[in-house]
Amino acid sequence: MKYIFTILLTYCFSSMYAQDAILNYAENDTINDNAVIDFGKKLQASFYEKETTFFLDNFDKDGFASKIVLTDEEIANSKDLKAFNGSFKKGFFSKFDAFPTKIIESMENDNSYDIVNFYYSEDEKKYHLLFRMFSDEEGLNYHDYQLNYVNNKFLIEDLYIYTTGEYLSDTLRQLYLMAIPKNYMEDINMSKEQISNMVFIFGYKNLVAKKEYKKALDLLNNLKGDIRNQKIFYILKIQVASEINEVYYMEAIDELLKKFPDDPSTQLMAVDYYVMLKDYNATMGALNQLQEVTEDDFVEYVKGNMAWEFEDYEGAEKAYTYIMNEYPNYQMAKINLLYLYDFLEKHEDNILLLNKIINSEEFSKQELIDFIDDKENEFINLPNAAIYTKWKEKK
């Protein structure tokens, strides 16, 4: 099934002066739909096989690099800066396998990494693949892969990371600008505002490196111009405010939510924000909006966790049951439901759930008994329940 939705994606310093990516357009048709689906399946399989080759072989290096380095016009055809650009790209791509390797390492640490859907951006005239990364320990994140169409072949051009609120190329653009030798600055053909923003990057990163977070926040607040209308401005404020204290952190998130109320990637931060405010309805509203935009029904599991935290036990049971039925291989929904029934002393429901798990041949009866009776697993009521004792003894 195809999902088409609009996501606002370009938020960074680079949007003020970065060159456009190499323009290669794919038609929005069934043939390309199927090609993108096949591409997504192969990409997902490569990660589960702990293989980076597919990612690297199908990455549009030229399209990606064009978003990062300054153009010949911007560097006024400076030979020094041309040489610097060449060295930067060579050095970066020689270590680019670090990104897919990081995904694989996250998966080895119990993160799942699965394709959710694909869509076609009418504004960009490009296809996108949306992947979900999740673990109970690290939470929920999405990677939105932007695909370029080169020589009748789809290639990864860039990816938008929800938890950072920006494209990977935007993040690297900042690193690139920081790396430009200061004595080359006079060769750059930019406006005063653009140069000012580059100087800001130097100052901001230096303050953060020295852990002078309050000064870094003050520097951000003193910025002028169009940058204050860009999402990266608010993302940076959140990042540095989180290092100061919870009050600054919540104020920074509040500014972001007010500035970009309909942006889907902000909803991940909104969940954290509303949980701290102890606002259950707003928390669930943010998750509902995220689920609607991504069309990812796995968000129900996160809703179950939030429902339990806010003591909506009926909502938690409903969410876990949904995930258990729709994602039968995801064990944590069943485990959480076992704990929920134990907490609520719904022992009959727990026995029914245990029998269902046994019938599905996921675990043996003895394995479940060992799990429940192990005091380290902290079941409170079920181990002492008469119905459980009777169930254990039954052959």
Image: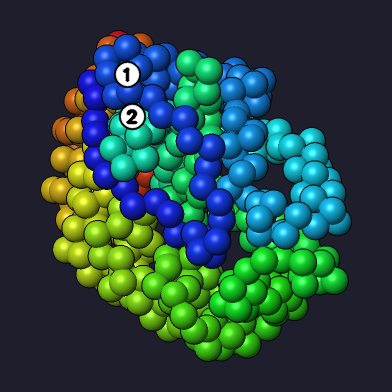
For disc 1, the marked residue is 33
* Residue 353 or residue 109, whichever sits in front: 109
For disc 2, the marked residue is 118
| Quadrant placement of the N terminus | top left
Type of amino acid at the residue the image marks with label 2: Phe
Q: What residue is at 59 percent from the left and 73 percent from the top? A: 191
Type of amino acid at the residue the image marks with label 1: Asp
For the residues labelled 2 and 1, the Cα–Cα distance comes to 8 Å
Residue 26 against residue 173 in the figure, above or below: above
Q: Position of residue 361 (x, y in %)?
A: 35, 11
Q: Position of residue 308 (x, y in %)?
A: 25, 53
- In the image, is 178 to the left or to the right of 136? right
Marked residue nearer the N-terminal end (2 or 1): 1
Q: Position of residue 340 (x, y in %)?
A: 26, 45
Residue 175 against residue 389 in the figure, above or below: below
Q: What residue is at 52 percent from the left and 83 percent from the top? A: 223
**Disc 2 element:** strand
Q: Are marks 2 and 1 in contact (CB under 8 Å)?
A: yes
